[in-house]
C-alpha cells in the first residue's frame, strides 16, 4: 500500500462479493445429485457422496490459499455449509417429493428449518445485489470518481491504518457547494493509506485528474497520490506517484493525464486500464485528518 509496496491485489467479481463459497457448494450439490439418476441405486450413491465431497473440496480450496497470495478464511467454510444446506432444503422440498425416492427428509423439510436455510442462503448471496448497486452508482457518476453524496461511494474505498467517513461539508470550506465530503484520518504508521479500488478504468477521453483537499490544520502535511494500471508489477518506478504539500484551507489538485501516463520509467501507463487510486502519508507520528471531495476526470 505504500510507495514501496508489493503488487496490488485485484478484486475479482465473486471475491469482492464474498459469496463464492455459497454459490460454489450449491453448484457442487447440483452436479453430484443430478450427475446420473437413471436408477435409484446410482442416485443413492451420489446422494451419500455429495455432502462430504462438496465440503472436503471447500476445505481443500481454503487450505490451498495458505500457499498462495490469498488467505484462508473460516467464514468461507461457513458459506460452504450454507450452500450445501440450502441445496438440500431445495431438493427435499421440491425435487424429492416429485421423484418419490425413498429418503427420509423429516428434519430438513420442516417449515421452520426451510425458512431459516432460505434466509441464510439469501444472506450468503446478498453481496451480489449490494455490489451491483455500487457498480451502477460508480458508472453513473463518471467522470466523477467520488463525490461522497451517496453511501455507495464508500464501497470502493479501503483503508490501511486510516479511518474514513462521509461527513457534512466543513463550514470553513469556502466555495464548496457539496453537501458531504470524505474525512480521512491518517493514523501513526509508516504508510497509512486509503485506496479506491476498481475505478472506471478507461480515462482516454479526458485530460486531467483532479480533486479538492481541505485542511484546518495550522501546519502543512505531506500526502502522496498514487495511481496504478493493470500492468503494474509493484516496482516504485512503474507507477504514478506525486507528493503534495497540503496547506491550511482549500487545496485544488489538478494533474495532467499526460503526466500520469508518462510516469513509469520504462513504459507508458495504460490509461485505458487504470486499476486503483491511493492517497497515503509517510511516517505519520501523530494522527491527523484532512477532507477530500470532488475526485474526478476533466
Image (tube, rainbow, N blue to C red):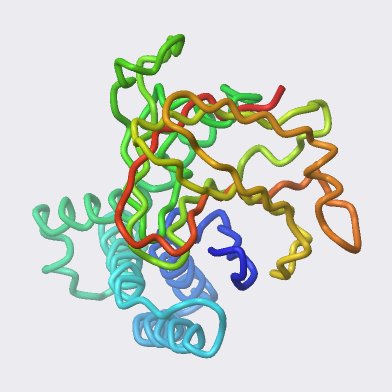
Q: Is residue 16 placed above or below 76 in the rendered structure?
A: above
Q: Nearer the viewer, residue 67 or 25?
A: 67
Tell me if I can see residue 271 in this picture. Answer: yes
Query: In the shown orientation, is residue 171 left or right of residue 275?
Result: left
Q: Who's the residue at 46% across and 45% down the image?
A: 221
Q: Who's the residue at 62% across and 49% down the image?
A: 243
Q: Is residue 275 placed above or below 57 in the rendered structure?
A: above
Q: Nearer the viewer, residue 93 or 185?
A: 185
Q: Is residue 39 placed above or below 121 in the rendered structure?
A: below
Query: In the shown orientation, is residue 239 left or right of residue 184?
Result: right
- How many numbered marks are there? 0
Q: Who's the residue at 11% across and 53% down the image?
A: 111
Q: Nearer the viewer, residue 219 or 153?
A: 219
Question: Which percent across, then down, holds residue 118?
Answer: 24, 52
Question: Which percent across, then down, holds residue 246?
Answer: 50, 38
Query: In the shown orientation, is residue 66 left or right of residue 203?
Result: left
Q: Quadrant of the C terminus?
A: top right
Query: In the shown orientation, is residue 237 left or right of residue 125?
Result: right
Q: Is residue 210 placed above or below 245 in the rendered structure?
A: above
Amino acid at each position: 500500500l505504500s510507495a514501496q509496496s508489493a503488487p496490488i491485489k485485484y478484486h475479482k467479481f465473486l471475491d469482492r462479493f464474498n459469496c463464492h463459497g455459497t454459490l460454489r457448494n450449491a453448484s457442487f450439490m447440483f452436479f453430484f445429485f443430478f450427475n446420473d439418476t437413471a436408477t435409484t441405486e446410482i442416485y443413492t450413491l451420489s446422494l451419500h457422496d455429495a455432502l462430504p465431497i462438496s465440503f472436503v473440496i471447500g476445505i481443500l480450496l481454503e487450505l490451498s490459499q495458505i500457499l498462495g497470495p490469498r488467505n484462508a478464511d473460516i467464514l468461507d467454510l461457513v458459506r460452504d455449509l450454507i450452500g450445501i444446506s440450502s441445496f438440500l432444503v431445495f431438493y427435499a422440498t421440491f425435487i424429492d417429493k416429485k421423484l418419490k425416492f425413498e429418503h427420509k427428509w423429516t428434519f430438513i423439510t420442516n417449515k421452520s428449518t426451510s425458512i431459516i436455510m432460505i434466509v441464510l442462503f439469501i444472506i450468503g448471496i446478498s453481496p451480489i445485489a449490494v455490489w451491483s448497486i455500487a457498480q451502477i452508482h460508480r458508472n453513473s457518476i463518471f467522470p466523477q470518481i467520488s463525490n461522497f453524496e451517496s453511501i455507495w461511494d464508500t464501497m470502493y474505498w479501503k483503508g490501511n491504518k486510516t479511518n474514513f467517513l462521509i461527513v457534512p461539508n466543513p463550514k470553513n470550506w469556502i466555495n464548496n457547494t457539496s453537501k458531504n465530503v470524505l474525512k480521512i484520518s491518517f493514523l501513526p504508521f509508516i504508510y497509512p493509506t486509503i485506496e479506491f479500488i476498481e475505478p472506471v478504468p478507461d480515462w482516454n477521453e479526458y485530460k486531467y485528474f483532479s480533486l479538492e483537499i481541505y485542511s484546518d490544520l495550522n501546519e502543512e502535511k505531506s500526502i502522496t497520490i498514487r495511481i496504478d494500471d493493470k500492468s503494474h508489477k509493484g516496482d516504485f518506478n512503474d507507477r504514478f506517484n506525486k507528493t503534495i504539500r497540503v496547506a491550511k484551507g482549500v487545496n485544488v489538485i489538478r494533474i495532467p493525464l499526460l503526466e500520469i501516463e508518462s510516469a513509469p520509467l520504462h513504459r507508458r501507463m495504460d490509461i485505458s486500464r487504470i486499476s486503483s487510486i491511493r492517497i497515503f502519508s509517510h511516517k505519520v507520528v501523530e494522527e491527523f485528518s484532512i477532507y477530500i471531495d470532488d475526485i474526478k476526470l476533466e
